[in-house]
Amino acid sequence: MIILKNATYIDWQSLEFSKTSILVNKGIDNNISFISNSEIENYKNVETIDCSGKLVTKSFGVGHHHVYSSLSRGMGAPKKNPQNFQEILKYVWWTLDKCLDQEMIEYSALTTAIACAKAGSTFAIDHHASPFAVEGSLEIIANAFEKIGVSHLLCYEISDRDGMNITNKGLKETESYLKNKQALVGLHASFTVGNNTLENAVTLMNNYNSGIHIHVAEDLSDQAHCLKTYGKRVINRLHKFGVLNSSKTILGHCIHLDHCEIELIKNSNSWVVQNMESNLNNKVGHFSGTGLGNNIMLGTDGMHSDMLQSAKFAFFAAQINDKINYDSTYKRFRNIHHYLKLNNFKGDGDNNLVVLDYASPTPLNMDNFYGHFLFGFNSAIITDVISDGKLIVKNRIIQTVDENQVVRKAQEIATKLWKKMAQ
């Protein structure tokens, strides 16, 4: 148990404010209860955090992440300067993922989980790729996340781009992991997944009551390939195979869609995840949620682990061509909780909380919360993070591992990775 004393609690759904002390129960999907200060005397051996002047609310979640990109920050230029999105994949990300080994995967996951936790996210949905270190990769990531204390929903990025032997390894890794853990069936994108692989992936999805996690129309080239090869657009192809039937399915990016595809998604059970910063960085276009319905959540696409930052970018960049306002931005930010609850995924219960040290020069209340959320909140105000009732960040310091030791080792491994990429 943990007690958060003298907190200002903000209900993440109603946005109601209440002055209270909070008893946080430990365990997956456990609950919290509100107690008076006089009742605190009944819990003499329970760790108590004084939250006077601080805000407490539900923690955050990342709707689309890439653990494998964690050791890329500051790496040297690729062998060829990419001229388009296909070359960005070929000369940057597909060069990197081919070089990953098990140790690199482990430290990519550890540093990602640490970054998530310190930025207030206690749950991450990840889409992993390591074509020459497929076997056991998801278990390595899961163990690393659990070591830090961050819950997860993982998948392996199955793709035909490195040959059918590796495709089959991806399918086997996915099935092996699905037998024991909550997970999704990962696919890279339509243009690297043939019909046989797509059919096998959907079979896995159905056999294990899971969903597909796939990049969709991130760049126009994905649509061009699908039209040329299969005579139909990407969403139409996925719809034909039954990908959109599952409420667990996540469609990443969804930038270049026509009206028919938008209607198919809106009328389906699937979810869309928006990754605005990545789209801007890769110059692939601007996401618009217009017409897609309410099943839109936010991700980082592996660029970072800060969901408050992603929410700001989603709002500001979307002013160009998306019908988005304060309310809908916050809804997209929080929709990961609805996705997880709807599909009975574990690890996002009420006992996942963040403590915010937010000294605003202006009043903060239920009526103006969105203005503070978009123009005031940032990850620097996060002091404490509770995951499944366990304190994993205290006074901005990770409690579950020696962060400095992890970072030093990660820097050594990143150097090895960069040298390998340059060969």
Image (cartoon, rainbow, N blue to C red):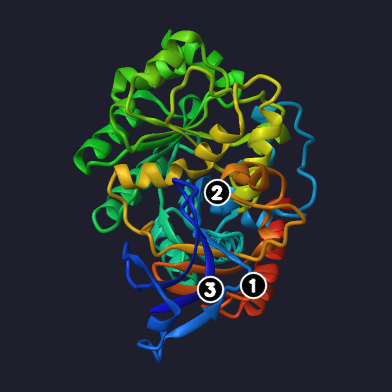
> In this rendering, does residue 59 appear at all?
yes
Label 2: state its secondary structure: loop
Disc 2/disc 3 C-alpha distance (Å): 37 Å
Relative depth, front residue between 244 and 221: 244
Residue, x 40% and y 91% (percent of image)? 45
The Cα atoms of the two marked residues, 2 and 1, are separated by 24 Å
- Between 226 and 267, the one lying in front of the other is 267
Residue 140 x %, y %? 44, 64
Say what amino acid the circle numbered 3 marks. Asn
- Which one is in front in this view, the residue at disc 2 or the one at disc 3? 3
Would you name the residue on which mark 1 appears? 396
Graded by Cα atoms within 10 Å as few (under 14), some (14 to 19) or many (20 or more), the crowding at tag 1 reads some
Q: Which residue is the site of mark 2?
A: 66
Q: Is residue 161 left or right of residue 267?
A: right
How far apart marks 3 and 1 lie (CA) works out to 19 Å
Nearer to us: label 2 or label 1:
1
Q: In this view, does 263 lie above or below 26?
A: above
| First along the sequence among labels 3 and 1 | 3
The amino acid on which the numbered mark 2 sits, given as a three-letter code, is His
Q: Is label 1 in a helix, a strand or a loop?
A: loop
Numbered circle sitting on residue 110: none
Q: Badges 2 and 3: C-beta atoms under 8 Å apart? A: no
Residue 405 picture location, percent across and down:
64, 79
Residue to which mark 3 is pinned: 6
Horizontally, residue 253 falls left or right of residue 306, namely left
**Residue drawn where x is 65% and y is 67% of the image:** 413
Mark 2 or mark 3, which has the lower sequence index? 3
Residue 298 visible, this angle: no
